[in-house]
Image (cartoon, rainbow, N blue to C red):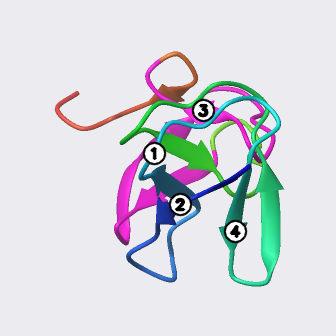
């Protein structure tokens, strides 16, 4: 099932889901469709590209952290696989 998402800035490499998505659902990003690899809840981030460890995560055009490990497109991005250096 196609799920709605939000991307604010062309730098963004994550999309924010506007409705919960199940494994196998798709998110349309431009002309591409990303298949969700797992459940991603409403308001949470999903990778719209493959990340390598240490790649910067951009949301709303801002650097919000970095990938702590390789993260394939379609994966939920949260504090279990994304770190942040702010305030350190």
Q: Give the Cα separation between the discs numbered 3 and 1.
A: 13 Å
- What secondary structure is marked by label 4? strand
- Along the horizontal axis of the image, is 46 left or right of 86? right
Instruction: Pick whichever of labels 1 and 4 is earlier in the sequence.
Output: 1
Q: Is residue 77 above or below residue 80?
A: below
Circles 3 and 1: CB distance less than 8 Å? Answer: no
Circles 2 and 1: CB distance less than 8 Å? Answer: yes
Q: Residues within 10 Å of mark 1 (few under 14, many from 20)?
A: some
Q: Give the Cα separation between the discs numbered 1 and 4.
A: 13 Å
Task: Please name which of the two marks, 3 or 4, marks the residue nearer to the observer.
Answer: 4
Task: Please name which of the two marks, 2 or 3, marks the residue nearer to the observer.
Answer: 2
Instruction: Pick whichever of labels 3 and 4 is earlier in the sequence.
Output: 4
Stretch in magenta:
55-79
What residue did someone put label 2 on?
4
Instruction: Pick whichever of labels 4 and 2 is earlier in the sequence.
Output: 2
Query: Residue 19: which numbered mark, if any?
Result: 1
Residue 77, given in percent of the width and then of the height, sits at 55, 34
Query: Residue 73: which numbered mark, if any?
Result: none
What residue did someone put label 4 on?
28
Q: Give the Cα separation between the discs numbered 2 and 1.
A: 6 Å
Name of the residue lying farthest toward the front: 1
What residue did someone put label 3 on?
76
């Amino acid at each position: 099932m196609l799920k709605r998402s939000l991307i604010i800035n062309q730098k963004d490499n994550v999309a924010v889901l506007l409705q919960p998505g199940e494994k196998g659902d798709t998110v349309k990003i431009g002309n591409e469709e990303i298949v969700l690899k797992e459940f991603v809840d409403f308001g949470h981030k999903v990778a719209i590209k493959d990340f390598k460890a240490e790649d910067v995560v951009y949301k709303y055009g801002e650097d919000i952290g970095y990938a702590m490990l390789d993260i394939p497109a379609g994966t939920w991005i949260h504090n279990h696989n994304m770190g942040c250096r702010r305030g350190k």
